[in-house]
Image (cartoon, rainbow, N blue to C red):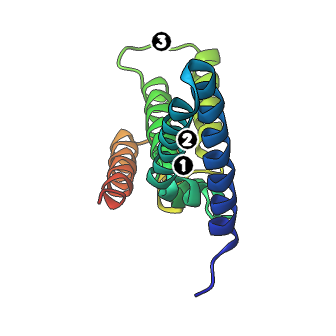
Amino acid sequence: MTSTLAQRIHLMITFVLVVCGTVGGGCLGALWGGWITALVAAAAAGLGAGAGSFLARRQVLAFLRPDATAADRGDGYAQGIADAVLVGIATYQAAAFPLTPDGVSDEERDARRTVAYRIAAHEGLPLPVRVSAAAALEAIDEGHDTESAHSAMKALSLSVYEHRTARMP
């Protein structure tokens, strides 16, 4: 059985944590009440460090995996970026198609457009959401038909929702 580099790194980190916890617990126990207290404190600290390292093993290995991107880790980062894209493009849509005439200034519309494009270009964004975001931005930029922009936003929100439910266990 061969172990990966991430597993070996985690094993080394675990070893260092357990040894430091054991030594620290032993020293603290010796200061508190002698050799028996030192042994009990060393065992408790070493056991606690080992148990904590074992419980965090999956997260540490996912973090140390070199080929893991934000979208692959499933830690919520990509979901957060996808939600931010949806909100950013929705505010740009509201500025491009205001409910009242002259409700949004040109400067505000341009600022919201810039923010929407910057968020949509984020590298941690999953590809299906990025494609839907580009289609929504294109529909809003055309600015002629509110229905096409609305259906593109609906497709974007469905893409974000599908990405979120695909990560659920």
Quadrant containing the C terminus is bottom left
**C-alpha gap between disc 3 and disc 1:** 22 Å
- Comes first in the chain, label 3 or label 1: 3
Q: Is residue 7 left or right of residue 57?
A: right
SS of the residue under disc 1: helix
**Residue at point 69%, 50% (across, down):** 16
Determine which residue is flagged by label 1: 138
Q: Is residue 54 left or right of residue 35?
A: left
151 and 65: which is toward the camera: 65
* Badge 1 amino acid: Glu
- Measured as percent of width and height from the top left, residue 110 is found at 64, 25
* Badge 3 amino acid: Asp
- Measured as percent of width and height from the top left, residue 29 is found at 57, 27
Q: Is residue 98 left or right of residue 66?
A: left
**C-alpha gap between disc 2 and disc 3:** 18 Å
Determine which residue is flagged by label 3: 102
- Residues at circles 3 and 1 in contact by the CB criterion of under 8 Å: no
Disc 1 crowd, CA 10 A, few/some/many (<14, 14-19, 20+): some
SS of the residue under disc 3: loop
Residue 141 circle label: 2
